[in-house]
């Protein structure tokens, strides 16, 4: 190194050029810095290149080239009811498979068709797979009907040559739709004890007997629903304490009828420090266990009911005292 040239002012290997005097031109102007890893200065992208993402796919000097022929791998979790460990599968983009999976999710989770148009789901899909065009709710409805038709065909194929035990119910409908799918060989029909079911079962028994497709002339075709019989037995036994059950039912209905009233009840529960995970619920006449759940839950909130009654009495007494005063 030349000791007469100070470091930083044109020394060999120095990145800073010496300052030029006014009016003089530098015969060797400095070249622009080269970006690390690319080997050439960045240039504006043309409209045909479609942005930086498309440019990186075709740029030969991009240090991390992408091979579209090589598919990423992922582990598919073991489904419930299937044996074995996780399976290594090829994870490639398929718009048809995503739409089918979305349709099955709507059916399995009993979601409304307009679920696909909700903001939360659309934001989720923008992150998970922004390339997937979210279908309209009518498209999802048609896809659900297509799956339904295919499943019906599968069931019809499974019923061929087989006797079927049917568990069903009858009701009055404004539509004229068939749900039996042309089943001709019945073994038993299980229904509750309603008189309308007796009439329907006798009609089916007559038709199968005429076609010689029943066993023993359909004598044992009509089976009674034991769950309905059990519910009738329990409801008959509860008649002896009907008045007490009716009082509890009226209290629960009174609390749930008003949001403000239910909020006041919740305050009484907190003040009494009642630790219970259940909530007040009304019973259903066709489910005897719902009556048990209503009574069992109400017993846990007895102190809250008492506190609420005391608060109402104090409020009424103060109001009466104020009027007389």
Image: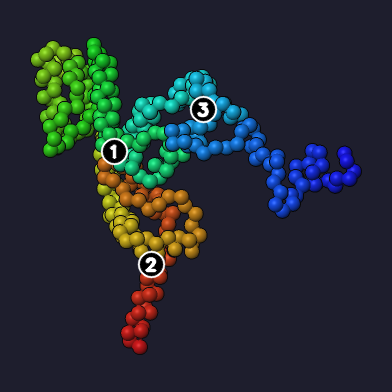
Give 102 or 248, whichever is nearer the viewer: 102
- Disc 2, SS: helix
Q: Which residue position is annotated with label 3? A: 58
Camera-nearest label, 2 or 1: 1
**x, y percent for residue 88:** 52, 21
Locate the N terminus and report the quarter of the image it occupies. top right
Give 78 or 214, whichever is nearer the viewer: 78
Residue 239 visible within the image: yes
Q: Mark 3: few, some, or many residues within 10 Å (few <14, many ≥20)?
A: few
Q: Which residue position is annotated with label 2? A: 309
**x, y percent for residue 38:** 62, 32
Measured along the vertical axis of the image, is residue 41 above or below residue 318? above
Which residue is located at x 32 percent, y 61 percent? 258
Locate the C terminus and report the quarter of the image it occupies. bottom left
The disc, 3 or 2, on the residue closer to the chain's N-terminal end is 3
**x, y percent for residue 8:** 80, 46
* Measured Cα–Cα span from mark 3 to mark 1: 38 Å
Q: How is the image coloured?
A: rainbow
* Measured Cα–Cα span from mark 2 to mark 1: 50 Å
Camera-nearest label, 3 or 1: 3
Which residue is located at x 52 percent, y 39 percent? 44
Q: Quadrant of residue 211?
A: top left
Q: Which residue position is annotated with label 1? A: 137
Which residue is located at x 32 percent, y 84 percent? 323
Which numbered circle lies on residue 55? none
**x, y percent for residue 183:** 19, 19
Taking the image as shown, residue 106 lies to the left or right of residue 27, namely left
Measured along the vertical axis of the image, is residue 284 above or below residue 206? below
Taking the image as shown, residue 33 lies to the left or right of residue 143, namely right
């Amino acid at each position: 190194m030349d000791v007469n040239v100070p470091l930083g002012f044109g020394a060999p290997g120095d990145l800073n050029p010496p300052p030029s005097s006014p009016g003089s031109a530098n015969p060797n102007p400095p070249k622009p810095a080269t970006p690390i890893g690319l080997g050439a200065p960045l240039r504006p992208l043309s409209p045909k290149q479609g942005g930086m993402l498309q440019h990186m796919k075709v740029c030969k000097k991009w240090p991390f080239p992408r091979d579209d022929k090589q598919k990423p791998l992922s582990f598919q979790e073991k489904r419930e009811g299937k044996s074995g460990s996780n399976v290594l599968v090829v994870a490639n983009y398929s718009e048809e498979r995503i739409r089918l999976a979305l349709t099955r999710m709507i059916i399995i989770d009993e979601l409304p068709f307009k679920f696909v148009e909700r903001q939360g789901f659309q934001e989720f899909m923008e992150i998970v797979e922004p390339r997937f065009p979210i279908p309209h709710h009518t498209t999802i409805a048609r896809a659900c009907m297509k799956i339904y038709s295919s499943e019906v065909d599968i069931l019809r194929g499974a019923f061929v040559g087989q006797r079927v035990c049917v568990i069903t119910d009858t009701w009055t409908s404004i539509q004229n739709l068939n749900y039996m799918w042309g089943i001709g060989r019945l073994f038993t029909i299980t229904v509750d004890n309603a008189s309308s079911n007796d009439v329907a079962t006798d009609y089916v028994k007559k038709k199968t007997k005429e076609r010689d497709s029943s066993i023993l002339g359909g004598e044992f075709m009509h089976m009674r629903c034991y769950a309905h019989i059990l519910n009738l037995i329990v409801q008959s036994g509860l008649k002896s304490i009907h008045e007490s059950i009716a009082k509890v039912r009226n209290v629960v209905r009174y609390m749930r009828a008003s949001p403000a009233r239910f909020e006041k009840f919740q305050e009484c529960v907190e003040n009494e420090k009642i630790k219970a995970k259940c909530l007040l619920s009304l019973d259903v006449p066709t489910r005897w266990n719902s009556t048990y759940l209503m009574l069992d839950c109400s017993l846990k909130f007895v102190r809250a009911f008492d506190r609420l009654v005391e608060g109402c009495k104090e409020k009424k007494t103060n109001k009466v005292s104020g009027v007389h005063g």
